[in-house]
Image (cartoon, rainbow, N blue to C red):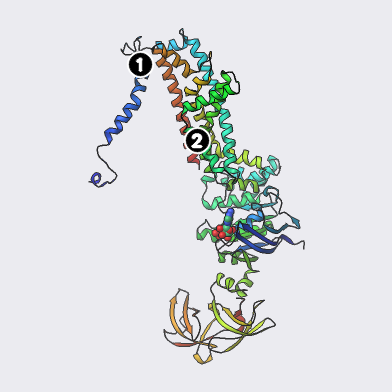
Amino acid sequence: MTDIAVDIIDLTKCYGDFVALKNVSLGIQDNEFFTLLGPSGCGKTTLLRTIAGFEDVSQGAIRLYGEDIAGLPPNKRPVNTVFQQYALFPHMNVTQNVMFGLLRLGQGDATARKRVTEVLELVQLTRFADRLPSQLSGGQQQRVALARALAPNPKVLLLDEPLSALDLKLRQAVRLELKQIQQDTGITFIFVTHDQEEALTMSDRIAVINDGQVQQVGTPREIYEAPQNKFVANFIGETNLIGVTVVDVSGGNATCTLPGGAQFTCPAAMGATAGPGHLSIRPERVAITAPETGVLQGVVARQVYLGTDMHIDITPTGGETITVRLQNSETTHIPGNGELVGLNFEAGSARLLVD
Amino acid sequence: MAAKTDLRRFTGFLPMTFVCLFLLYAPLIIVMVYSFNDSKSITNWGGLSLRWYEEVFWGVESAKFKAAALNSLSIAVVAAISATTIATMAATAMLRAGRFRGKSISFALINLPLMVPEIVTAVATLVFFSAIGFTTGYLTILLAHIVFCIPFAYLPIAARMQGIEDVYEQAAMDLYATRFETFRLILLPLMMPGIISGFLLAFIISLDDFIITNFVKGAGIETLPTAIFGSVKQGIKPNIMAISTLLLMVSVGFVTLSWLVGRMGQNKK
Ligand SMILES: Nc1ncnc2c1ncn2[C@@H]1O[C@H](COP(=O)(O)OP(=O)(O)OP(=O)(O)O)[C@@H](O)[C@H]1O
Ligand SMILES: [Mg+2]
């Protein structure tokens, strides 16, 4: 129990009639890079703001290392935030911005200054110590915001889409740096993003959120390879959803009837039941074969050239279009439009979802 | 030709602009020029001189004008400081207290006095003071000035504050600042250009005020505007033009300063 940094227990947050967060329960480990991932408006910022103390909770509890913090104002919580718009104080220079939290905590000028030097070195901003925020580029401002939040050595750092204002190149570089800083400082990071690639590359664990509800919590690999439901499978990466009839679920495996009539057995998500359901299978895990050796048969509808890869859309008899990703090499056989082909996939690559 | 295709061009209106400017500024310029006239006449030019300025500072009426100027100045300073303080607190309360019942009506009510005819305010203030049995004098002028300066100070302060996103205050609270520290260290410095503008505006409004002051001042005390008026009643002498010119300079100076401060604040953002 002592490893849990932030324990969110059955949290519900309403704005009037609108339910922004619905029965959210999350246990975020100490020293973890934890990501809240979800589409715009799903409640990520709201969840972060309840942890920081800017929003009160309608129901439920938030514990920080075992202590209930729901009633504490933001300035009494050992938690710091990197705001989406950075919110650097425009009338203070970089040093004063970073020093702000330290002085409020009652540190002396000398101690605070030493810490500021340390943190500015960490984010490589020593040269800009005397500049005003308006004299910095977006990327530099983002670093100041990070330094300012790190300086008081918070137990938990909350980051609300801190990279969204940066251009692609910078974003990719900062991702790795941010991860490095998290590992070096050992501070628990709760990171908000709607960018799945960002989430997959940086996180120890991810919580996928939709409509104010947690859809799935797991490592990037678990989320990607073993999605729990249709939303997660669709939101993380590309996937094919194949409508099937589930005959039987037992011991974590499901037996189902594919469109076309073939029987197929594959792993099932927890809570999947017999009846109509959906299999998820990634485009790169589907192989094109001769019609008679495939578990599915279909007609090639379209080819899309993507540079290193090709996407082949195939319409199976009695089912929805399935996309296959093929590596674009000289030896790959690319079937032509209208050609009848078979589709095959390993049992381990497919997964029955909770609808 | 570009001028012909420019749809925003309406020919023939340019002279109107000059007529307006002439009507607005000609009287002021005449007063300024004649304040340097070396003649007792206010219509004939008798050469350049500073005698009327000497007259203002050292002449027979100088004691009266000095006392009036001192009253005007001290009232303007105290009234502007008080009004600015009250307006700052009011703006903070209205714009940072979240939503409360009657917020928009309060907002309208604070600004409404700007549109009430001053003579009405003057009568009302006088009636109020006599109703509560206040003897008219320095204190009544001061109180009246504080009150009617509040909306003038409030305008630039509230405008400035509306432009400050509350994310700065959240950041400060997140970094362990108490509410008071957040106000003192973040909100107040960010509002400062608005506060200075408000102060200067209130100062100039108080310094220039005649109608209300004349109603509530009672006998035996004068501010500069009422003293000038009293003097003019016995005939316009050139020394009045000198005083008016001085007052105008002070006003223009303050308005310019207020404008510069407002602009500085905008550039910083
Ligand atoms: N103060 C508020 N009053 C009413 N509704 C609100 C308020 N704040 C947020 N909401 C609603 O709550 C929902 C979640 O908002 P939130 O800001 O948490 O989304 P988000 O996941 O951070 O989205 P984004 O990725 O666009 O930032 C939205 O539908 C939003 O309209
Ligand atoms: Mg958000």
Neighbours of disc 2 within 10 Å: few (<14), some (14-19), many (20+): few
Total marks placed: 2
Neighbours of disc 1 within 10 Å: few (<14), some (14-19), many (20+): many
Does the rendering let one see residue B161?
A: no
Residue at x 28%, y 33% (from the top left corner): B16
Q: The numbered mark 2 sits on a residue in which chain?
A: B
Residue at x 76%, y 58% (from the top left corner): A66
> Which residue position holds label 1?
B34
Amino acid type for the residue under numbered disc 2? Leu
Q: Residue B212 at x, y = what percent?
A: 50, 23
Asked if the residue at label 1 sits under 8 Å from ligand 1, the reply is no
Q: Quadrant of residue A340?
A: bottom left
Label 1, label 2: how far apart the Cα atoms are: 39 Å
Give SS at disc 1.
Answer: helix
Along the line of sight, which residue is nearer the eye, B224 or A31? B224
Position above or below: A352 against B100: below
Q: Quadrant of residue A275?
A: bottom right
Amino acid type for the residue under numbered disc 1? Tyr
Give SS at disc 2.
Answer: helix
Along the line of sight, which residue is nearer the eye, B173 or B228? B228
Q: Earlier in the sequence, mark 1 or mark 2?
A: 1
Residue at x 62%, y 71% (from the top left corner): A223
In the image, are marks 1 and 2 on the same chain? Answer: yes
> Which residue position holds label 2?
B112
Mark 1 in CB contact with mark 2 (< 8 angstroms): no
Quadrant that contains the N terminus of chain A: bottom right
**Seen from this angle, which residue lies furthest top?**
B60
